Amino acid sequence: MKETVYSFYLIIDEQERVLWLGHIFYEADGSDDEKFAFLRDAAERDFKTAKLTKPPVGMTLDSYNAMGRLGTALSLFEYAFKEHEPAAPVAIVTLIINGKPAINYHGNFAPTDMADVNKKLGALGVMDDWLVEYTRNGAIDLTSLINDDYLKAYKLLFNNHHYTSATKLFLSCIDSLAYVEFGEAKAGDKEANVFCRWLNTYVDLLPVGVTADELWELRNGLLHMSNLHSKRVQRKTVRRISISVGHVPPEKRSPHENTHYFNLVDLYAAVTAGIGTWLRTYADNYEKFLVFVERWDRTISDSRLTTYTPG
């Protein structure tokens, strides 16, 4: 049966920024397989004649891939359908990167099957897809995801009395969540310190008795040098802090000690409560969750290792 078929394009530069969206319509007949074959052949031949439209501001290849992960990529091209989106359009999307078609995988507009992608691209190992694994009853279990990726290892260290290592890992967890929320820090940005920004936005540190700036300096000292002497602490512009497990009464502290001790358990309680506050901002917010998927795909953890069996 003859019908309108759709060839869509993402015009991308070498920094993987989407510069343009493009489309060409064709009239084709035959089976669906024959129509898709026709579109694939035409895509490489005709892409320079596509009608171009500006993409959403700031769109990148990663953000497009995140839409593919959620099965919403076709919605990007809704503008191109003449009156209404067909129920099951025969359509393909071709990436044009730095002026050339970049085709290494053929899929559809259902949520991206990463196992199929890895198989067709010849990946050497197998990795569980977190988006599939943590989708339960039609919803993403973000609480379990964060627990398994970051908090489980912290609790293992804490329960085995490796408190310094546990603290390092916990502060690194805050780094990761801040990156997912705010992206990479940019030089010259007044709010470039996304670690402090995330804490100040979502965590009540008053019961802990420390500030986000103080935790940032503790993070810098511990992660980079395994000491408490960051540059700002040495200049005495930020109070030097360190951990205790349990409360240390003032009368038990040395009068010569110039380090403020806070209870690591209090910090854990405050930050995990803040994680709950943060996760609630994703409720019914597709655009924000799309960014979450894009950035979480870039993070690594013990719970997402590639299994490789030689031979």
Image (spheres, helix red, strand yellow):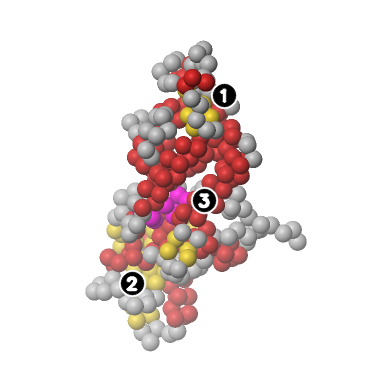
Label count reads 3
Is residue 218 visible to us here?
no
Is residue 199 visible to us here?
yes
| Furthest-bottom residue in this view | 1
Q: Which of 249 and 201 is in front in this view?
A: 249
Q: Nearer the viewer, residue 117 or 8?
A: 117
Q: Position of residue 252 (x, y in %)?
A: 52, 21
| Furthest-left residue in this view | 83
- Kindly report the distance in space between the C-alpha atoms of the residues bearing marks 1 and 3: 27 Å
Q: Position of residue 285 (x, y in %)?
A: 33, 57
Q: Do the residues bearing badges 2 and 1 touch, measured as CB atoms within 8 Å?
A: no
Residue 53 in magenta stretch = no
Magenta stretch in the rendered image: 288-296
**Residue tagged by mark 1?**
227
Quarter that holds the N terminus: bottom left
Residue 183's label in the rendered image is none
**Residue tagged by mark 3?**
147
Foreground mark, 3 or 2, reads 3
| Furthest-right residue in this view | 311
Residue 25's label in the rendered image is 2
Q: Residue at x 39, y 34 (%)?
A: 207
Q: Residues within 10 Å of mark 3 (few under 14, many from 20)?
A: some
User: Which is more N-terminal, label 1 or label 2?
Assistant: 2
Q: In this rendering, is residue 72 above or below 182?
A: below
Q: What residue type is labelled 1?
A: Asn
